[in-house]
Image (cartoon, grey):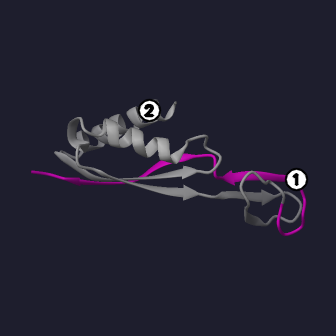
Amino acid sequence: MHEYSIVSALLEQCHQHAVENQATKITKVVVKIGVLSGVETSLFATAFETFKLEGCTYDAELVIEQQPIIVRCVQCHQEQQVAERSVKCPHCNSFNTHIIAGEEMLLMQLEMEQD
């Protein structure tokens, strides 16, 4: 389960942001996880709940935003959201598309407190 190592890296990043902003507590962590990122969101959430207990994230709420797949069609130049695992343009039915969103995992927001 690579979700554990991803969560470990995320919590380290959160800790760094807390130190840089002189925060003593992180209350909320918002991440965006793409459908094609390879991250299983339920395992990710479980790993977060397990590992957050150390340090400034012990009471943090995790919010996961699911990023759908968005493709740009080379034929008709449209950007469209597509069904999971499909890269066919819904506008012109071309398979000549590029995925422009849905493969990433991003830290979107941190809510922190100072004592």
Question: Viewed as shown, does residue 76 lie left or right of 52?
Answer: right
Q: Farthest residue toward the left?
A: 115
Question: Compared with residue 72, is residue 5 higher up or lower down, i.e. above or below?
Answer: above
Q: Report which quarter residue 93 is drawn in.
A: bottom right
Q: Residue at x 34, y 43 (%)?
A: 49
Rendering coords of residue 12 (x, y %): 34, 34
Q: Which residue is mark 2?
A: 4
- Percent x, y for residue 57? 25, 43
The answer to whether 115 is drawn above or below residue 4 in the figure is below
Determine the residue positioned at 73% across, 51% down.
Answer: 99
Q: CA distance from mark 1 to mark 2?
A: 35 Å
- Numbered circle sitting on residue 96: 1
Residue 108 appears anywhere in the view: yes
Q: Is 35 on the left-hand or right-hand side of 29?
A: right
In the rendered image, residue 103, in percent from the top left (x then y), is placed at 63, 46
Secondary element type, mark 2: helix
Residue 41 in the magenta stretch? The answer is no
Q: Secondary structure at mark 1?
A: loop
Whether residue 23 is visible to the viewer of this picture, yes or no, is: no
Tell me if residue 110 is in the magenta stretch.
Answer: yes
- Height in image: 19 above or below 64? above
Of the two numbered discs 1 and 2 on the same chain, state the one appearing first in sequence.
2
* Badge 1 amino acid: Asn
